[in-house]
Amino acid sequence: MSTQAVAGPVADALRRVRHHLASRGAALEAAFVAALAGEATRDPVLAVASAGQETSGALGPLVAGDAAGPGVASTVDALGWLGVLGLHEGAVVERAVAFLAAAQERDGSWRDPGANGAEQEAALVASVCAVMARAPAARLSALRRGGAALGVRWSRERVQAGSYPLISGYLAALASLPADLDVADEALQWCGRELERGFRTGTLGAPAVAAVFVRCDAHALPGSRLRAEEVGLALLAAQQEDGGFPGDGPPERAACVAAAALRHLAPALR
């Protein structure tokens, strides 16, 4: 991600997000958005991640609403936020990737106490694959094993039922994994279609849909006719009067999710 300052409506929206977060006393989240906007360095966010890192390499929760940890899920959450800031390398990231590699199960999957049931387990595997695939320190063998575990867990029925964690997870993982999977084409097409359907019907809000573009590091998605400009404009329109955004979990997390998406979609909103 570029650290250059943004301008226009995205800059105004990010400024309102920062004020919203500051008014709630969310200093770290405000620092995250400031770094996104190119108005501050990434150092404060990286320092907090480093301070919360276990000797095993596991990262604790970074942004409000992250999974409890330190563990696999919290490490994935933290790596996701660092990745949005363009931090895919460095000691903190490399230790976290090594922790995830060591935590990989014999069948190539990952487990976490917070992931209960087949749907949540598959979403976790997808999330780990997505963040590891963007880290140069990750071994190709671990990614291939993770991709195979993800393929075994593919379920068209759960995606058709509107499972956002699976739709977003599969799109993010398959957009990043180097290995070819037998289910890849089918999964990408189904997930793209269901994401668009959720957006068109209002089942999925603009922040949730825009977040998938961030996770995929893309401005277009397979199987979907959604355009970056269309989603970005809907996201701008979703900003609330106080500068926050609707979303699941704590308002601070929803604001950071939306801010990351706005920054990513900014080139389409000039």
Image (tube, rainbow, N blue to C red):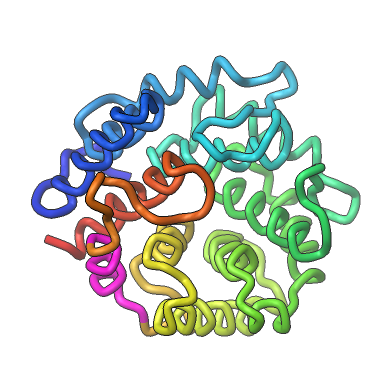
Most extreme residue toward the front, as rendered?
241
Q: Is residue 158 left or right of residue 37?
A: right
Give the quarter of the figure containing the N terminus: top left
Q: Quadrant of residue 100?
A: top right
> Is 31 left or right of 165, judged from the image as shown?
left
Q: Determine the residue positioned at 79% across, 48% down.
A: 110
Number of numbered labels in the structure image: 0
> Which residue sits at x=75%, y=65%?
119
- Queried whether the magenta region covers residue 38, the answer comes back as no
Q: Nearer the viewer, residue 68 or 155?
A: 68
Task: Find residue 19 and report its horizontal and vertical position in percent.
Answer: 23, 34
The magenta segment: 226-236
Q: Which residue is depicted at the point 35% across and 52% down?
A: 245
The residue located at (68%, 34%) in the rendering is 68
Q: Quadrant of residue 95?
A: top right
Where residue 144 appears, as percent x and y from the top left, is 73, 58
The residue at the far left in this view is 8
Q: Position of residue 36 (x, y in %)?
A: 29, 39
